[in-house]
Image (spheres, grey):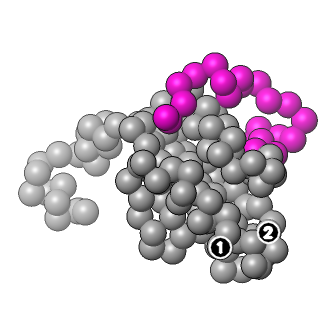
Amino acid sequence: MIAHLARCKVALAELRRMCPPVFVTPDVRVPVEPDRGEQVIEQVRSAWSEYPQTTIDGVRVTFPNGWALVRSSVTESALTFRFEADASSRLPAMVHTFCDALGEFGDQLWEAYRATTIGPDRCPVDPTATEEPR
């Protein structure tokens, strides 16, 4: 990185300002029975099959304004989810739409997302008020 900055004659702060902002969730872990984890991952692949996917270590679905990732945890019987959007207002809607595609498991994911990001007792953002990834 230092060599690149020296070659370009640009400060690290300036290089950072050139990067677009992104908004990402922390890891959202949802407990799951060991045999159910692969079924949920396959359900994600199927539900979002019209979007580009990377299937290394789970599945990452790329949406026009961000992405969603689900993979089996290596430390516990759980699935780990992560979401990224190009605007903070799009992130809750993306997660909500993703959860809707997973039925009952999606309800568990939504509650885990709320608990991880804003606390389990309140939800200040209406997830249906902004664009959805579809």
**Position above or below: 126 against 121:** above
Q: Earlier in the sequence, mark 1 or mark 2?
A: 2
Residue 103 left/right relative to 48:
right
Query: Dot 1, crowdedness within 10 Å: few (<14), some or many (≥20)?
Result: some
Give x and y (percent) for residue 91. 57, 36
Give x and y (percent) for residue 20. 34, 37
What number of labels is visible?
A: 2
Give the residue type at disc 2: Val
Label 2: state its secondary structure. loop
- Magenta-drawn segment: 110-134
Give x and y (percent) for residue 69. 54, 58
Cα–Cα gap, marks 1 and 2: 10 Å
**Residue that badge 2 annotates:** 32
Residue 102 tag number: none
Label 1: state its secondary structure. helix
Query: Dot 2, crowdedness within 10 Å: few (<14), some or many (≥20)?
Result: some
